Amino acid sequence: MSQVHLHKFQSPPPETPFAPWWNYIIARKHTDIDVQELRRVILIKEKEIVEKYPNSSYEYSNYSDGYTGLGPNSLTSRYSFFNLLEWDYPVIKDLHKNIKIFHDEYLKGTVGEQKDLPLGIRCWANVMRKGQQIKKHAHSSHPWSYLSGHFCVAAEDTTTNYFHPYNDNVEFIKNEPGQMTLFPNWVPHNTSKHKGDSERISIAFDIVFDAKNGYKSGHGKDPENDNTIPL
């Protein structure tokens, strides 16, 4: 099993009632997931999904790209219409398995092993062409916020950048195919500009928590119509 690398951020104890306090971890590890097969599958599905949900249609004209800046023509802007982990390919099942394993490792290294948590997951892909980048954004800041993750499928000399919530410090993590990253889903992040000629492809996911057994969307959607599946 690949070694887990931890980026720890912990403040000194606050000395006044108004001083900020933080304690969080960004974790990353390499996997043996077949990224070439994932790339092939995602590019096929990108075409299918964009054609199925055209932005020229009134019904789908108000796409949200999740504040990434990738725009209404992107696969990212259709993230609410599909869950990548439901695609019926062996490599997708392998990805799902690896996310579960890494989640359990993350918990053991932070808050300790947890049993029977009511967890769901939504998962999508980002396909970027030359000159594109993902703008600074965060996935959730709700009381039920939990964890988010990235998986690098294909990249050429780019980074994903994680911003400290209280100051201007940035943690730059190089995008390496096969690398998975986990972090609290309120941590703001962006990417550097993609300058390569081939597609830069990543998979993003939110692991969501709801003690009432009805997965909360984390971004204001109706949970009954959400595309979340069990982790």
Image: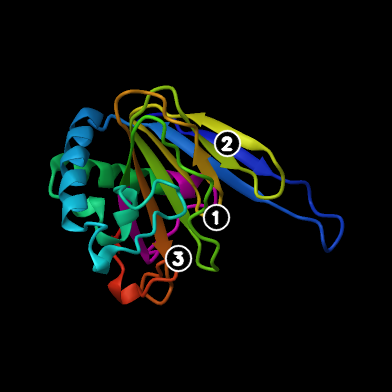
**x and y, in percent, of residue 11 in the image:** 73, 46
The local secondary structure at tag 1 comes to loop
Q: Is residue 171 above or below residue 222?
A: above
Which residue is rendered at x = 30% and y = 31% of the image? 199
Q: Is residue 43 above or below residue 84?
A: above
Judged by depth in the image, the label closer to the viewer, 1 or 2, is 1
The quadrant of the rendering that contains the N terminus is: top left
Image check: 39 left or right of 25?
left
The local secondary structure at tag 2 comes to strand
Q: Would you say residue 120 sits in the magenta stretch?
A: yes
User: Which residue carries the number 1 mark?
Assistant: 186
Which residue is rendered at x = 19% and y = 52% of the image? 49
- Residues rendered magenta in the picture: 104-124
User: Which residue carries the number 3 mark?
Assistant: 218
- Give residue 7's mark: 2
Amino acid type at circle 2 is His
Which residue is rendered at x = 55% and y = 68% of the image? 143
